[in-house]
Amino acid sequence: MFITDIKRVIDQVSREKGIESEVLINTLKEAIISAARKKIGPRADIEVHYDNKTGEVEVFHFKEVVEEIEYSDSELTLEEGYEYDPECEIGDSLGIKIDTEEFGRIAAQSAKQVIIQKMREAERNAVYENFIQKKGKIINGIVQRFDRGSIIVNLGQAEAVLRPRDQMPRENYKRGDRIRAYVLDVLEESKGAQIILSRTHPEFLMELFKTEVPEVAEGIVTLRCAARVPGLRAKVAVSSMDSDVDPVGACVGMKGNRVQNIVQELRGEKIDIVQWSPDIARFVCNALSPAEIARVIIDEDNQSMEVIVNDEYLSIAIGKGGQNVSLACEITGWHLEVTSEEEYSREVKEGYDSLTKLTGVGLSMAEIFFKSGYSSVRDISEADFEDIVSIAELDETQAKEMIEEAKIILENDLRQEAQEAQEAEQEKDPEPEDDEEIEKSEDN
C-alpha cells in the first residue's frame, strides 16, 4: 500500500483536525479510485474496501466478460476470464484484486493530492460547522495582525475579522492582545469559513449581561432589548419572571459590581438599565429616566408619542447630542418628541387661539378638537368633513363650511407672516438711497 499504517493516520487526523473518520475513509477511497483510473484507464470500474478494524485496504478492478474487447480497461475475453474464474460466462463481471503499488509514483502522487484536497475541504467544513454554532455568542481570541483597519483575530482553529465599523471608538489593540467579541456572522466561502466579529452590536451588550448576571443566564430575568451608541451610552430593557426579583437590581449587582464589569469591558460606556413594562407609556417614562415625565400624549396610529417634561429635566431627557431620547426611541420602537412644559403650554395656547378664530368654536369646542388630535386651524383645513361631523356634531354642510373657513384663515395667517418677515428683513437691512439722491446730498 502506498500509504503505510493508514488506520493510524486516519485516527490521528480525525483527532487533531476534528474531522469524522468516515469522511477521511471516503476521501481515501476516492483518491485510490482516481489513482487507479489514471493508471488503468478512465472507464475502469474500481471498488475499494477498507477494514475499520485492521486498516487494510483492498482494491478491485471489475471487468465484463465479452466475446470481443472494445474497451480494454473495462472488458476482458472469455479466455482471460477463465484465468480468474473457470466457471465464468459471457456477460459476467469479474472483480480482479489489484496491488496499489502497480499504480506507480505519478498515480500515487495524484492520490496524495486528492487526499490532501479532500482533507482541507473536510477541515473547512468542520471549522464552519463548529463556529456556526457559536454565532450570536461571545468568543475570545488573540489579536494576530491588522489589515486595512480591520483586526484579524486568532481563534485557534480559524481566523476572524473585526471590521472598522464593528470596533469600539478609541479602542487600541496591539499584536498579542486578548480580545472578546460577539460572533456576528459565519460565512461559508470557497477559501473557508469567514467569521465576522463585532464589539459594537447591541447583542454583544446583552451577551455580556448573560455572562455577568446569573439571574439572566437562569431565565429569571429577561433581557427584552438593547440599544447602543458604542463607547458612549447604552440602554437595556429588562423584566423579571419572579415578582420577588428586581430585574434592575439584579443587573446592577451589589454596589454596582456586575454592571461595572460590563462598563469596563466596553471602555467606560454608560449603561442605563431600564424596567420594561407592557404599558407603553410606562415603558417610555422608564426609558427616558433619569428625567421626570409630566405627561405623555399618545398617537397609536403612528406609534408616536409627545412627552412633556418639567423644564429643568428637558436637557436630561434629550441627553447629550440627543442620545437619551434616541436610545429610548430605539428600545421602545416608538417615535418620541420631548417638549418642556413651558413650550407645551405655549403650543396649547396658540392652538386654542387658532381654533377659536373659527365661527362657532369656543373654548369648550376647541378643547374637544384638541383632544381629538386637531390642535390648530391647519389641522382643521386638512381634515375630512366626516371627521368634523362626528367630532363637532355638525351637519355635512356646516362641516364643509368650517373646513373652507379654516383654509381662508390659514391662508391669511401665512400671508401676514410672510409680510411681517419681509418688513423685519427690511428694517434689519434698509435699502440704500439711489445714486441721484446721494449726489444731491453731496452737492449741498
Image (cartoon, grey):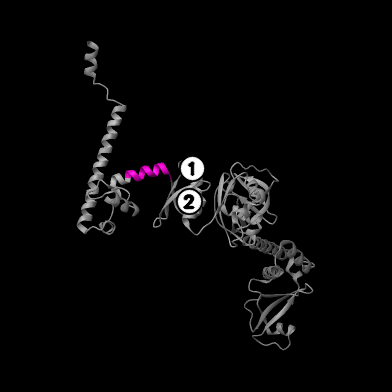
> Which amino acid is tagged 1?
Tyr
Membership of 349 in magenta stretch = yes
x, y percent for residue 172: 64, 42
Query: For numbered disc 2, what is the local secondary structure?
Result: helix
Along the line of sight, the residue nearer the viewer: 162 or 87:
162
What residue is shown at x 64% (from left), y 71% (from top)?
A: 42
Q: From what the image shows, is residue 169 above or below residue 386?
A: above
Residue segment shown in magenta: 339-350
Using the rendered view, name the quadrant where residue 270 is placed.
Answer: top right
Residue topped by disc 1: 313
Do we see residue 332 in this rendering?
A: no
> Which amino acid is tagged 2?
Cys
Tag in front: 1 or 2: 1
Query: For numbered disc 1, what is the local secondary structure?
Result: helix
The answer to whether residue 168 is left or right of residue 304 is right
N-term-proximal mark, 1 vs 2:
1
Do we see residue 422 in this rendering?
A: yes
Along the line of sight, the residue nearer the viewer: 419 or 77:
419
